[in-house]
Image (tube, rainbow, N blue to C red):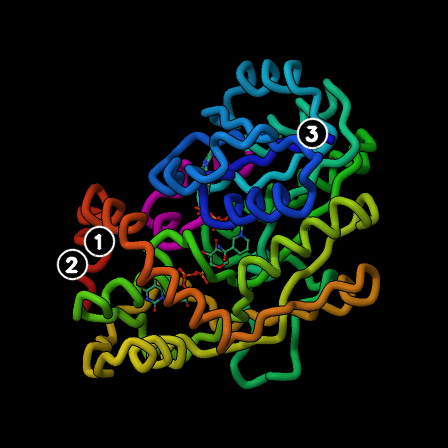
Amino acid sequence: MTIIVTGGAGFIGSNFIFHMLKEHPDYRIVCIDKLTYAGNLSTLKNVMDHSNFRFVKIDICDRTAVYRLFEEETPDIVVNFAAESHVDRSIENPDVFLQTNIMGTAVLMDACRKFGIKRYHQVSTDEVYGDLPLDRPDLFFTENTPLHTSSPYSSSKAAADLLVLAYFRTYLLPVTISRCSNNYGPYHFPEKLIPLMIINALADKDLPVYGEGLNVRDWLYVEDHCKAIDLIIHKGRVGEVYNIGGHNEMKNIDIVKIICKALGKPESLIKHVGDRKGHDMRYAIDPTKIHSELGWLPDTKFAEGIQKTIDWYLKNEDWWKPIVSGEYQKYYEEMYGNRT
Ligand code: NAD
Ligand code: TDX
């Protein structure tokens, strides 16, 4: 079995590669990644020499390079994690989101049609459903919730999802889609809420909470997401969408306070800053389908997962220090410098 994993030098893709090499030692895993600012080869250093692993630097929008690789590798399965993934960046510059998230998905699926494939899996997000009101805790996203996006990022992911379903219906491409809630864990790029707060708190820097911090996200430990995708590509029904989430809704401000407490830092570091444009209020997944059809349930409780994550950042400064010292400084200054 050969699996192409796109975006495997990023946060979730790399965790998925580690999971698959451990759980399926006889599978060949081929990672393709453009190595954008979010892709980091040092993340993959422990598997680079693994006999069943290959890394190739490819942009998924580069049709010639993608076709050449498919011809060489004749993959059985493709799992597409590659994407521009940060909502704030999509608000500043939507263009690259449309290119990678939509056109890149089309190129990959065209390659799947041309060379044949057992399964194409699209890693999508709960953000395609838009948001839920804070005063209706009884409401959850199901797979039948209409797509109703807020940001250029979520719109590009929703467009890709529709394209994937169109390739299933029109060309009978054997596809599946998963829509997961917010992930956290090791190798999470420090532009995202949890790693940003851990790293700023460690340096006694301001902790920039957007608006009042009352927005709710439904957090899932990354390993549980990887297990769910492993199940879907083996046992999921083609043409189906599976929501992934563990009923772990939390307000942003509470997450930041938990991080302060765990690191012994004062809450006075918290600084309320200007809100994100079009900021989604609440995400909450109903995971009934994946639980009842595939038997998936998350294994890691938030209290355990956040401690493991904090410990990982404490022990792995050599991974994140080079990231936050380079281009990231410029990004941080532009994104947060004038945010009042
Ligand atoms: P990430 O930004 O950490 O990693 C993205 C990876 O894709 C990077 O390695 C980057 O170099 C690569 N990439 C970007 N453009 C590329 C291109 N044109 N060609 C090849 N590679 C390219 O993202 P992540 O958080 O690991 O998210 C992975 C996937 O999961 C995305 O599709 C995202 O939409 C989805 N998702 C993320 C979350 C979350 O909480 N992080 C939740 C649900 C779904
Ligand atoms: O500095 C910050 N301050 C802050 O208050 C940052 C970076 C974020 N926030 C808030 C915005 C959100 O309400 O925290 C919440 C989480 O923000 P992000 O970490 O940027 O994640 P989110 O926008 O929820 O999107 C994430 O989950 C769904 C991923 O980045 C997406 O790729 C995924 O699809």
| Viewer-side label of 2, 1 | 1
Neighbour tally class for label 1: few under 14, some 14-19, many 20 plus, Cα within 10 Å: few
| 5 vs 201: above or below | above
Closer to the camera, 102 or 304?
Answer: 304
Residue 142 percent across, percent down from the top left: 71, 66
Give whichever of discs 2 and 3 has the lower sequence position: 3
Is mark 2 in CB contact (under 8 Å) with mark 3? Answer: no
Q: Amino acid at mark 3?
A: Thr
Magenta stretch, overall SS: helix
Left or right of 235 in this view: 73: left
Which quadrant would residue 3 be assigned to in this image? top right
Give me the residue at 34% from left, 60% from top.
Answer: 313
Q: Amino acid at mark 2?
A: Gly
Residue 94 percent across, percent down from the top left: 40, 43
Neighbour tally class for label 2: few under 14, some 14-19, many 20 plus, Cα within 10 Å: few
Give me the residue at 66% from left, 61% from top.
Answer: 244
Q: CA distance from mark 2 to mark 3?
A: 46 Å
Closer to the camera, 163 or 329?
Answer: 329
Residue highlighted by disc 2: 337
**Magenta region: which residues?**
85-102
Residue 274 sits inside the magenta stretch = no
Q: CA distance from mark 1 to mark 3?
A: 39 Å
Give me the residue at 33% from left, 59% from top.
Answer: 315
| Viewer-side label of 2, 3 | 3
